[in-house]
Image (spheres, rainbow, N blue to C red):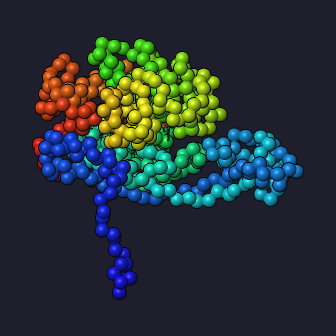
């Protein structure tokens, strides 16, 4: 009987520390401080919905390079001249996708399933198989409007991580005063190991399954790590395919190419928002960015745009760390040249490594580069307590989501290092996503200058409110009014940002009721 008793029984839940519980520590601290309504707290403590589903796709045939040792067995294999090189798609993992017509018209020399390409390497021909991918969409809260949040394609994702990121979106949309809630999702995949058509198929299948869960007035995805405007275009296509009113559905995703309903300024918006916050931080001290120095982790969408804008404002980039390594130049790294290096089609890993205008250094040394600012713009959890002890900067502006652990936060406070927390610093992306959504709804097109002017006002207004909450300085100025949000005592900036979010969300429940 004992085995029957154990059969199909879920273990009793044990409270454990996870990425989500860690991310929610600040929520609980702020909720305690403002005496958040008990029921609102319950509504926000866990997401509304947590979806997990699977996507399958047929992969293409690949040429897999042999290690030099194994290649010796094929010493006599002559080179196959490829007449249609566009048919070969090189991937970051060294493999090559063999598209249908790649070898058409070529004299193909195959020995035991291997061939030698003009690059001299021997490759094994591996037939494409079907593969299954795990996909997620977490819808955290919609009290203030439709769920809103990015789609991440990355190997290291989990339900727990997406819960944390979706909750962040709930706070961020409230802080930026855009009429959305919070969501996040994506696929467990390393997109750099798949070909263009494979990613297209995987994305179409992903949207096919997602379609019943989202909508332009229900849940609106956007790009995040590993996705971009091309992926958003595919998602729009799949969502609207065959619909009679498909042009009314452009608002199903934001972050689209401007030629198909994207907003001017959206691609740079997150980096632009980080720069506006930093500019305001120094402006308050009567300083500008001229001559200021910074180190940057992540040179993707947020990092590269942010760096380019800061350089234009007069700041100097000293070091960059990305997924593949770190570069340093004490005289300053030329950001447009680095962007050209990373986006060169020959740079398959899209890495900063190999940039001629800087030297390679170790990651551990990156964190110890002396500079005015550190901008994390890669993944979460990178600034640990240990890193926080070693940093030699005066300000951290969080471009990434959740880059600083709670322990590190405490160390930074103790060391007097200032912080512009993620839920305000990187809110520029979702703010311009909102502008894109309005433009889609109204069938309008705004200029880049108009977008950036609105963004600047929104970012600086809300950042000023957060600083006032932090210093307990209730006031009304030409640009902002912090009186409804100050709590009668000083708090750290991250807690201040969370207080602003919670007060704005709580108002919806208390005034509208709990039906949403
Ligand atoms: P991206 O995919 O364009 O670029 C990611 C960058 O991070 C790449 O340079 C990559 O090499 C680097 N990276 C990845 N793993 C790393 C590691 N282990 N160590 C060091 N570097 C690593 O992504 P993105 O859109 O620029 O997003 C970056 C961060 O900003 C994420 O945390 C994302 O959630 C956040 N964010 C993005 C947006 C947006 O609009 N794209 C908006 C708000 C927040």
Query: In front here: 368 or 245?
Result: 368
Residue located 80% across and 59% down the image: 112
Residue drawn at (36%, 49%) of the image = 19
Q: Is residue 181 visible?
A: no
Q: Is residue 46 left or right of residue 357?
A: left
User: On screen, 441 above or below 162?
Assistant: above
Residue 485 lies, with reference to residue 236, above or below; the image says above
Tell me what residue is drawn at x 67 percent, y 54 percent.
Answer: 61
Q: Position of residue 327 (x, y in %)?
A: 56, 29
Quarter of the image where one finds residue 260: top left
Q: Quadrant of the N terminus?
A: bottom left
Q: Is residue 229 above or below residue 124?
A: above
Asked whether 12 or 161 is in front, the reply is 12
* Residue 443 position within the rendered picture, expressed as x and y whole percent measured from the top left: 35, 32
The front one of 11 and 220 is 11
Q: Tell me if residue 195 can be seen.
A: yes
* 280 left or right, relative to 199: left
Find residue 440 and report its horizontal and vertical position in percent: 35, 35
Q: Position of residue 107 (x, y in %)?
A: 83, 47
- Residue drawn where x is 34% and y is 36% of the image: 411
């Amino acid at each position: 009987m004992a085995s029957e008793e154990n059969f199909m029984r879920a273990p009793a839940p044990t409270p454990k520390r996870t990425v989500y519980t860690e991310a929610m520590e600040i929520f609980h601290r702020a909720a305690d401080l403002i005496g958040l309504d008990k029921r609102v707290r319950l509504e926000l403590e866990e997401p509304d919905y947590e979806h997990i589903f699977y996507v399958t796709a047929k992969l293409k045939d690949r040429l897999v390079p042999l290690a030099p040792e194994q290649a010796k067995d094929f010493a006599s294999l002559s080179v196959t001249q490829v007449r249609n090189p566009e048919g070969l798609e090189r991937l970051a993992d060294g493999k090559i996708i063999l598209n249908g017509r790649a070898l058409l018209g070529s004299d193909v020399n195959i020995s035991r399933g291997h061939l030698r390409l003009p690059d001299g390497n021997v490759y094994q021909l591996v037939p494409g198989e079907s593969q299954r991918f795990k996909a997620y969409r977490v819808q955290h809260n919609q009290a203030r409007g439709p769920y809103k949040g990015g789609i991440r394609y990355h190997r290291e994702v989990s339900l727990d991580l997406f819960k944390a990121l979706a909750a962040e979106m709930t706070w961020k949309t409230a802080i930026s005063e855009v009429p959305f809630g919070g969501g996040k999702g994506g696929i467990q995949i390393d997109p750099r190991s798949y070909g263009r058509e494979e990613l297209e198929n995987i994305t179409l299948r992903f949207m096919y399954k997602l379609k019943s869960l989202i909508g332009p007035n229900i849940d609106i995805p956007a790009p995040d790590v590993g996705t971009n405007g091309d992926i958003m275009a595919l998602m729009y296509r799949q969502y609207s395919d065959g619909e009679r009113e498909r042009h009314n559905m452009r608002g199903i995703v934001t972050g689209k190419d401007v030629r198909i309903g994207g907003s001017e300024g959206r691609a740079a918006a997150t980096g632009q928002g980080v720069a506006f916050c930093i500019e305001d931080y120094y402006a308050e001290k009567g300083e500008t960015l001229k001559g200021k120095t910074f180190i940057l982790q992540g040179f993707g969408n947020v990092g590269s745009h942010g760096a380019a804008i800061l350089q234009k404002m007069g700041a100097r980039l000293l070091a960059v760390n990305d997924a593949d390594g770190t570069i340093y130049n004490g005289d300053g790294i030329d950001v447009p040249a680095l962007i050209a290096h990373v986006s060169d089609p020959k740079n398959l890993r899209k890495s900063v490594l190999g940039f001629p205008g800087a030297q390679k250094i170790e990651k551990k040394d990156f964190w110890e580069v002396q500079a005015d600012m550190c901008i994390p713009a890669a993944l979460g959890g990178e600034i640990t307590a240990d890193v926080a002890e070693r940093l030699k900067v005066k300000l951290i502006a969080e471009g990434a989501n959740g880059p600083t652990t709670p322990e590190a936060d405490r160390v930074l406070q103790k060391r007097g290092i200032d912080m512009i927390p993620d839920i305000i610093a990187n809110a520029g992306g979702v703010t311009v996503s909102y502008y894109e959504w309005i433009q889609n709804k109204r069938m309008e097109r705004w200029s880049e200058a108009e977008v950036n002017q609105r963004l600047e006002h929104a970012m600086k207004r809300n950042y000023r409110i957060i600083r006032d909450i932090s210093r307990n300085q209730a006031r009304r100025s030409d640009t902002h009014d912090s009186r409804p949000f100050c709590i009668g005592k000083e708090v750290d900036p991250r807690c201040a940002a969370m207080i602003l979010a919670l007060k704005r969300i709580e108002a919806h429940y208390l005034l509208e009721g709990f039906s949403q």
